[in-house]
Every structure is written in structure tokens, then in C-alpha cells.
Image: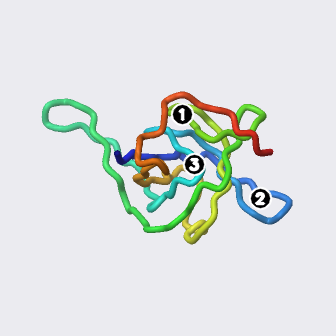
Amino acid sequence: MDRNIEFYVHGLVEGESGKLRFVGRCCADTIQVGDFFESVFAYEFATDSAGSEVTAHVHPEPLHLRIARIHAYGQFLDLLGTGMTGTLDLEGSGQELVRPGLVLGGESVAANGQTAPADVKSSTAS
């Protein structure tokens, strides 16, 4: 089953290795190491004719970034749940398109074809 993954980027930090770390919040389904982001976009908020708030993706740009590592709450994690903040180490093309205030988005399938569990498990990697 596909998962709609989104990560709101609050900031960028350059590590000692020169690689960028993306600081932000998971704002859709749980994300996990190995997932791919396929676009970066802004949100536009509006009200429809019924008075309900609606959102739209504005100015989407394609990219291909794989989540190599997740760090949050002082440890490396396999998963980052909805609403959790953390840093992501990403690999691939399009990093230059990402800036604070934008959202990374993608659809992902867990390795076993099942949706990722809702709980967050700690990784044994460091």
C-alpha cells in the first residue's frame, strides 16, 4: 500500500563532511529510512466555496532524494512518525532545490509491500 510522505523543511545544516542535513517535521504518513522524495513544493492555503480550508501544492519541482538516515531526540531512528521533528540525511539529485519553508513529498512503499507501522522504533545503527 502506498504511503503519502511529506517533510516540512525548517532549515538546512551542513555537516563536517560537507553533506546537508535537512531539519524539519514529518507532516503526512510515517517516513522511514530508504523512502524517496520525488518533489519539493510550497503549500497554498485557501477556503473553498463551502468555507472549508483546502491546501494545494504550488510550484512543484521534481527531484529524487532517498532518506539515508534519520536523527531525532538524540538517537538514530528507522522511522519518523507524523508530527515528529528531526533531521534527515538525504542522497540523490535535487538537493539544491530544497530551502526552508518548502515541503519534500513522495509516495512510498515499505520494503515488504506493507505500510510502515505507526510506532517509531530505534535503530541499532549509529
Q: Quadrant of residue 39?
A: bottom left
Q: In the picture shown, does residue 3 fall above or below 60?
A: above
Residue 80 or residue 41, whichever sits in front: 80
> On residue 9, which mark appears?
3
Disc nearest the viewer among 1 and 2:
1
In the rendered image, the quadrant that contains the N terminus is top left
Q: Looking at numbered disc 3 in the image, what kind of residue is underneath it?
A: Val
Residue 88 vs 29, above or below: the answer is below
- Residue ID at (71%, 42%): 71
Which badge, 3 or 1, is on the more N-terminal residue? 3
Image coords of residue 109 (percent x, y): 42, 50
Q: Where does label 1 land, which residue?
A: 81
Residue found at x 67% / y 39% = 77
Q: Amino acid at mark 2?
A: Glu
Quickly name the residue at label 2: 14
Residue 98, horizontal then vertical, whole percent: 56, 61
**Closer to the camera in the image, 72 or 8:** 72
Of tags 3 and 1, which is closer to the observer? 1
Name the foreground residue: 78 vs 17.
78
The reply to whether discs 3 and 1 touch (Cβ–Cβ < 8 Å) is: no
Q: Cα distance, mark 3 to mark 1?
A: 15 Å
Q: Amino acid at mark 1?
A: Gly
Taking the image as shown, residue 109 lies to the left or right of residue 90, namely: left
Residue 51: horizontal and vertical position, in percent?
19, 30
Tell me the CA gap for discs 2 and 3: 14 Å
Badge 3: few (under 14), some or many (20 or more) residues near its Cα, within 10 Å? many
Outermost residue, front side: 112
- Label 3, secondary structure: give it: strand
Sequence-first disc among 1 and 2? 2
Q: Residue at x 50, y 58 (%)?
A: 36
- Res 89 quadrant in image: bottom right
Q: Residue furthest right?
A: 16
